[in-house]
Image: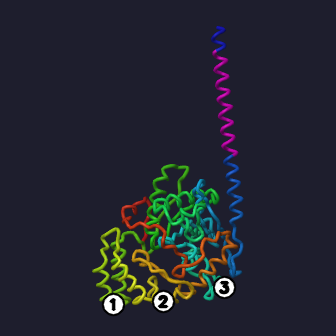
């Protein structure tokens, strides 16, 4: 009886100690979680953008901008800008916009020239409301990715413009998970990934990663669909389509069209030869000239070399290049510098290429991504 009593007492003490350890562990985790939540709310408040240079007084929406560190040890910092819809933002989806390139800034292109809430004035001194902005229908999230593009950077400069599409997808996914901690009201919101050009690589890979990781309910992102404009997904069809389109719109001569088909082996994933690139350079610089390939009916673009030398680009880089029609390249670039102090961005650039913020040495991939388009959500291409 005495031995049995001692054993019972030992069991009681064992479970009591185990419960104390479990409670202590839970308390520590709760404190850590609470502190992390407080840090994110503090950072969110710091990210609030109340004013931009030359911003019209009539704007009625909230905007945020800042960094999310996606790699703690190395320090890879991705820059974002969020514009919330001015009417019923809580009832509208979250739309992520990614520009292509590879290496083009979503701020320098999508935000400043296309679907963002503002357009830069013609002389580059201020902003006007973009009456065709998607902000009327969604909350817009612009992401500069990968590191080294636009305002995003790495603490290790050698990491900029490197790593390939797989790391870009991983970093973008990590960004979303951590960004949603800063903006938890969007965790259950309908989410769409959109973009153009080389985002035809970025978007399917990111969507596939989200689809796979959503098996963990705690990390679920409410992905509803993806949309890609002029997507770069398959080198053969992209290149053939561009060249045939130029001919059909009298942008190049029949001879140049035939020369390109003869010199360029688009079935080769390592395309293209020096002869092919020379023919392509001639087509772009001599025959196409200032015509905007995104809108061939618009007025000719200003020359991009009135402020800095134009780099000679390869075929796979320049088939989707463009310059802004409504603002000169030097003004667009200068305005990006003027933004720095207002949005808390770090100055990563000392010159511009092609009149808008693109870094073409960013590592791209030429393999087809048609096999990654089945990602468990709706898909739209335009």
The residues colored magenta run 7-31
Q: Is residue 75 magenta?
A: no
Labels 1 & 3 near each other (Cβ < 8 A):
no
Tag 1, which secondary structure? loop
**Mark nearer the viewer, 2 or 3:** 3
Q: Which residue is drawn at 68% across and 75% down?
A: 60
Q: Residue 373 carries which label?
A: none
Q: Nearer the viewer, residue 25 or 189?
A: 25
Q: Residue 253 carries which label?
A: 1
Q: Distance between the residues labelled 2 and 3?
A: 23 Å
The image quadrant that residue 208 belongs to is: bottom left
Tag 2, which secondary structure? loop
Q: How far apart are marks 1 and 3 (CA)?
A: 39 Å
The image quadrant that residue 242 belongs to is: bottom left
Q: Is the magenta stretch mostly helix, strand or loop?
A: helix
Q: Residue at x 43, y 58 (%)?
A: 376
Which residue is under mark 3? 125
Where, quadrant-wise, is the N terminus in this rendering? top right
Against 79, is 305 above or below? below
Mark yes or no: residue 334 visible. Answer: yes
Which residue is under mark 2? 298
In primary-sequence order, the first of circles 1 and 2 is 1
- Picture coordinates of residue 288 (x, y %)? 41, 88
Q: Which of 75 and 5 is in front in this view?
A: 75
In primary-sequence order, the first of circles 2 and 3 is 3
Q: Distance between the residues labelled 1 and 2?
A: 20 Å
Tag 3, which secondary structure? loop
Q: How crowded is the residue under tag 2: few (<14 C-alpha within 10 Å), some, or many (20+)? A: few
Q: Residue furthest top?
A: 1
């Amino acid at each position: 009886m005495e031995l049995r009593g001692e054993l019972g007492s030992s069991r009681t003490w064992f479970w009591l100690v185990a419960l104390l350890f479990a409670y202590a562990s839970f308390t520590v985790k709760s404190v850590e979680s609470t502190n992390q939540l407080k840090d994110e709310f503090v950072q969110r408040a710091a990210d609030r953008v109340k004013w931009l240079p030359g911003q019209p007084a009539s704007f009625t929406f909230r905007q945020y901008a800042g960094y999310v560190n996606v790699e703690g040890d190395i320090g890879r910092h991705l820059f974002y800008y969020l514009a919330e819809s001015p009417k019923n933002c809580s009832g509208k989806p979250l739309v992520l916009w990614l520009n292509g390139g590879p290496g083009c800034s979503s701020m320098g292109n999508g935000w400043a020239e296309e679907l963002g809430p503002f357009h830069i004035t013609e002389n580059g001194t201020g902003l006007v409301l973009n009456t065709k902005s998607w902000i009327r229908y969604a909350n817009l999230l612009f992401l500069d990715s990968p590191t080294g593009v636009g305002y995003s950077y790495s603490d290790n400069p050698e990491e900029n413009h490197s790593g390939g599409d797989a790391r870009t997808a991983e970093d973008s996914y990590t960004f979303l998970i951590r960004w949603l901690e800063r903006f938890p009201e969007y965790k259950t919101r309908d989410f769409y990934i959109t973009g153009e050009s080389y985002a035809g690589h970025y978007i399917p890979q990111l969507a596939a990663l989200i689809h796979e990781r959503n098996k963990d309910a705690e990390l679920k992102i409410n992905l509803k669909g993806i949309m890609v404009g002029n997507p770069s997904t398959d080198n053969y069809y992209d290149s053939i389509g561009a060249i045939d389109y130029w001919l059909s719109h009298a942008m190049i001569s029949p001879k140049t069209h035939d020369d390109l088909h003869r010199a360029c082996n688009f079935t080769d994933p390592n395309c293209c030869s020096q002869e092919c690139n020379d023919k392509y350079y001639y087509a772009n610089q001599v025959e196409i000239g200032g015509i905007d390939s995104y809108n061939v009916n618009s007025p000719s673009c200003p020359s991009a070399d009135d402020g800095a030398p134009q780099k000679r680009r390869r075929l796979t880089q320049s088939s989707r290049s463009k310059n802004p029609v409504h603002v000169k390249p030097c003004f667009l670039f200068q305005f990006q510098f003027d933004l720095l102090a207002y949005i808390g961005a770090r100055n990563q650039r000392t010159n511009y290429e092609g009149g808008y913020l693109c870094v073409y040495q960013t590592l791209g991939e030429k393999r087809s991504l048609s096999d990654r388009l089945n990602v468990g959500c709706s898909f739209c291409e335009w």
